[in-house]
Amino acid sequence: MRMSRRRFMILVTTLVALNTFFWIAGSGFALPRSIVNQFFGNKMIRAEVIVQAPGAAQDWRIDRGVITSVAGTAVTLREADGTSVSVDVSPAARVQGAPRIASASKLRPRLRVVIYHQANAQAQLVQVEGRS
């Protein structure tokens, strides 16, 4: 019986010490903010992000560039590295960042945008960053 209490106290002490360590050092184990900004900040050209969702993984594309043409629902971007990419944008997509551009039908050439979409699906979100 005495040995059982001793083991219990060692276990409790260890758990409290471990919990305190992770509570104090928790933010130190996260990626530094500068690394996150380096990947997803203003210098990002394009990204493919795989998100583990319940049941299946989701494949997301993020494209940043200047609109060179709009034809129906297809928006063509010139990205910072010179690559042109065509993205299908849903007519019901949310457009953020510019009060005068409230819908996808108002997207025009020379706008700098970031387009978020799942691979092989129409974009549901467009962020307008300004004019080129």
Image (spheres, grey):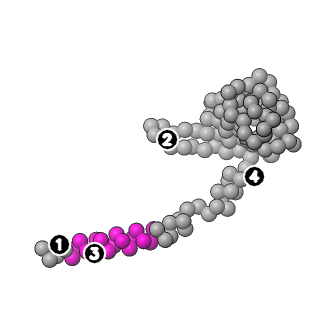
Tell which circle, 1 or 2, labels the residue nearer the N-terminal end. 1
Q: Secondary structure at mark 2?
A: strand
Give the x, y percent position of residue 55.
45, 37
Q: Which residue is found at the position 74% from the left and 46% from the top?
A: 45
Q: Which quadrant would residue 116 be assigned to in this image? A: top right
CB within 8 Å, label 3 to label 4: no
Tell which circle, 1 or 3, labels the residue nearer the N-terminal end. 1
Residue at image mark 1: 4
Q: Secondary structure at mark 3?
A: helix
Between marks 1 and 4, how big is the CA–CA gap? Answer: 58 Å
Q: Which residue is found at the position 19% from the left and 74% from the top?
A: 5
Between marks 1 and 2, how big is the CA–CA gap? Answer: 43 Å
Residue at image mark 4: 42
19 magenta-colored: yes
Front residue of 100 and 36: 100
Q: Label 3 sits on what residue type?
A: Ile
Give the x, y percent position of residue 18.
39, 70
* Label at residue 10: 3
Q: Which residue is found at the position 80% from the left and 31% from the top?
A: 107
* Label at residue 53: 2
* Label at residue 128: none
Between marks 2 and 3, how big is the CA–CA gap? Answer: 39 Å
CB within 8 Å, label 1 to label 4: no
91 magenta-colored: no
Segment tinted magenta in the rendering: 6-22
Between marks 3 and 4, how big is the CA–CA gap? Answer: 50 Å
Q: Label 2 sits on what residue type?
A: Ala
